[in-house]
Image: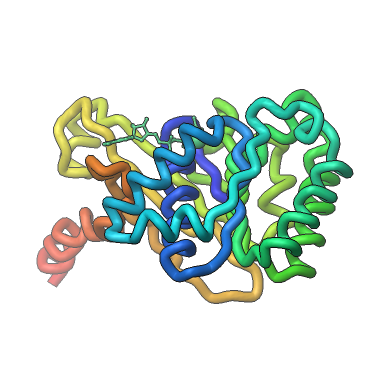
């Protein structure tokens, strides 16, 4: 799955939450961190485990971290990275993978994004590894679409896309629609598409809790339900 959104929309939080959930189920998960160094990621994972009432020991036992934040040799060499990934997945019986972020692997060579994604996708598919590939959006890319850095390269190849977005309430119309005061942020999540699989088509409102967890609140459509009912009543 491609997990995309502009900066600060909660992609890393969701990726970490996914990894901790899998560790909680005693499933080996590999976390490739391209941005945050391993020691920061470790702290984030452990605090999430505590907030989710999952034993910290499970995080330590089932989550493997491949830290590429300072390893430019592996980061820039797709063949070496695939070999490392292959060795890690086989020797540690990896079932799930989070790559945060995939965009970081083709910095300054977005033209090759498609090839990089395709090679990686084929490998992961063969090994049946559930993967969350985090990709950042560039300014100007439609905020609720599947497009991200590298164009549609990631979303076209992988099985599906989850999009996170945030919107700042800037006027009275938005304030009335989203039922939030001006200046507050409304966060949205939706599944943009999923190949060969039925999925929920609704856009949901979510919040990031004090413990830095994603909490889905309600479908966005709920906000207009009252208005629609009112319109219906008037029509009859
Ligand atoms: N404890 C908290 N309470 C409320 N919001 C929080 C909390 N911790 C983090 N956040 C929000 O989550 C955002 C960070 O989310 P995250 O790091 O997952 O973003 P991201 O989508 O991965 O961004 P990037 O593309 O820059 O990596 C922060 O900017 C902040 O708004
Ligand atoms: Mg991030």
Point 58% across, 54% down: residue: 132
The answer to whether residue 1 shows anywhere in this view is no
Image point 54% across, 31% down: which residue? 36
**Within the image, what quadrant is residue 186 found in?**
top left
Image location (x, y in percent) of residue 212: 31, 42
Q: Do we see residue 91 in this rendering?
A: yes
Quarter residue 100 falls in: top right
| Nearer to the camera, 102 or 171 | 102
Task: Look at 62% across and 49% down and name the residue there.
Answer: 133
Compare residues 134 and 172 and report the one nearer the observer.
134
Q: Position of residue 206 (x, y in %)?
A: 30, 50
The scheme the figure's colours follow is rainbow
If the image is split into quadrants, where does the C terminus sit? bottom left
Identify which residue, 226 or 154, lies in the foreground: 154
Q: Name the residue at 45% across, 70% down.
A: 25
Task: Report x, y in % for residue 131.
Answer: 62, 58
Q: In this view, does 223 lie to the left or right of 71?
A: left
Q: Pinpoint residue 68: horizontal percent, then vertical percent.
A: 67, 34
Q: In which quarter of the image is the N terminus?
A: bottom right
């Amino acid at each position: 799955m491609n997990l995309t959104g502009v900066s600060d929309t909660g992609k890393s939080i969701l990726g970490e939450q996914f990894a901790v959930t899998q560790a909680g189920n005693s499933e080996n998960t590999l976390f490739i961190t391209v941005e945050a160094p391993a020691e920061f990621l470790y702290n984030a994972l452990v605090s999430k485990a505590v907030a989710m009432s999952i034993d910290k020991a499970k995080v330590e036992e089932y989550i493997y971290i491949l830290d590429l934040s300072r390893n430019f040799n592996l980061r820039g060499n797709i063949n070496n990275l695939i070999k490392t990934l292959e060795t890690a997945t086989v020797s540690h019986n990896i079932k799930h993978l989070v790559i945060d972020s995939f965009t970081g692997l083709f910095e300054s060579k977005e033209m090759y994004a498609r090839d990089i994604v395709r090679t990686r996708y084929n490998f992961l598919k063969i090994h049946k590894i559930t993967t969350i590939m985090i990709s950042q959006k560039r300014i100007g890319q439609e905020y609720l679409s599947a497009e991200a850095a590298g164009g549609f390269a990631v979303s076209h190849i992988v099985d599906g896309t989850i999009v996170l977005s945030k919107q700042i309430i800037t006027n009275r119309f938005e304030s009335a629609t989203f039922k939030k005061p001006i200046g507050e942020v409304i966060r949205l999540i939706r599944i943009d598409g999923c190949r060969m699989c039925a999925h929920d088509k609704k856009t949901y409102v979510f919040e990031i809790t004090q413990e830095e967890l994603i909490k889905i609140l309600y479908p966005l459509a709920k906000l207009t339900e009252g208005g629609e009912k009112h319109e219906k009543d008037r029509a009859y």
